[in-house]
Image: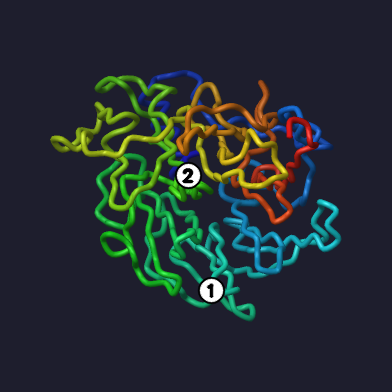
Amino acid sequence: MNHGEHGATTLLLLVCCLISSITACAGMAPVTPTPTDPAAALHLPPGFQAGVFARLPPAGSDYFRGPRFMAVGPDGHLYLSLGRDNKVVMLPDRNHDGRADEVVTVADRLNAPQGLAFIDGKLLVANQDGVVRLENGHALPFISGLPAGGHTLKSLKSGPDGYLYLNVGSSCNVCTETDPLRATILRYTADGKPAGTRGAVWAEGLRNSQGFAWHPATHAMYATNDGADMRSGTQNGKPDDSLPPEHLNRIESGAHYGWPYCWGNRLPDPNFAAPAGNCAKMQPPALTLPAHSTPIGIAFVDTSVFPAEYQHDAIVALHGSWNREQPSGYKVVRVKFRDGRPVGVSDFITGWLDARGAWGRPVDVMFGPDGALYVSDDRAGMIYRITSTGVGK
């Protein structure tokens, strides 16, 4: 799903039905029962295996609840945001058996937390209206005044340059924003001061870039981005399931990435006219992904635990479509890089989706200090641990 509020999503789906005049309206893949052994139900390439690291309350058909984004603390433990459950928890694995020992609440009564980052040993949490610093059980203001609502969940990471990066999604599906902080990636100093090209704004024209990471060799920043819903390739045409493509963007200082007027390789939206020359100025995507597959979490492979041919490739979680007649996403993919640039996409983890519906929706991906890949799944309430069995190393 391209993330808006639950009510807004329902309204958009009704509008979709009216516009397209279809009798069976497209929707999110129905919720199917979680398998007794979820890890065994997942399909991975030869040489990899999945295990369940932790089980948490599932979101089911709810939006924004359940396991969302992860970070590793200075103590080596995995920390996890629970979105609309308004909590951050810690999942320690003290005996290193590949399973969390317990679920420890670190903070609750937060405000739709998502992104997590550690600075000077302190945990920063991106709420929907700002960033807080957790100290002795208290949430202290760190960055305030961020716009809430719309694409409300915000991601937060510390970059290799020592700056903090934060996404702010759009307030709408397609519109001209009046708030310059909307549809951007922001940059701040480690003490919370704006450090972008225009105030805190680092890059713009990004409808909702919840996932971003840095290439281990080039240090280039790459971000996933959700394209707009219910678009057509012709003026006043029926919404097309295949438009617009989702983006994987190489994020550069001061660049504009097209939304709301343009998508793909500088193509104008025929139903939302751009100012003259606008699309020619946009930064085209480094790579495109299937429309409405909702790419979110991204992590680069930089661990000897994975086979050599995977090194410096990206792993991306496709959370899954909500407004498409034929569902897309609901899987994790590998983006192959060559000479520091993305060149292709292949499935890495599948099995959540079948003809009946989907029992899980991957959200975030992260490599732990043990070199394993951790994957969060909000629908099923799972954290999976992916390891290599040594085949192909």
State the scheme by which the image is colored: rainbow
State the SS at label 2: loop
Q: Is residue 387 above or below residue 179?
A: above
Count neighbours of disc 2 (C-alpha within 10 A) and say few if under 14, some if 14 to 19, many if 20 or more.
Answer: many
At x 38% / y 29%, what residue is drawn? 244
Q: Are marks 1 and 2 in contact (CB under 8 Å)?
A: no
- The residue that mark 1 highlights is 133
Q: Position of residue 90 (x, y in %)?
A: 71, 63
Q: Is residue 143 above or below residue 310?
A: below
Q: Nearer the viewer, residue 200 or 367?
A: 367
Q: Quadrant of residue 29?
A: top right
Residue 3 badge: 2
Q: What is the CA distance from the residue labelled 1 to the residue labelled 2?
A: 25 Å
The disc labelled 2 sits on which kind of residue? His
At x 47% / y 75%, what residue is drawn? 141
Count neighbours of disc 1 (C-alpha within 10 A) and say few if under 14, some if 14 to 19, many if 20 or more.
Answer: many
At x 40% / y 33%, what residue is drawn? 229
Q: Position of residue 70 (x, y in %)?
A: 62, 55
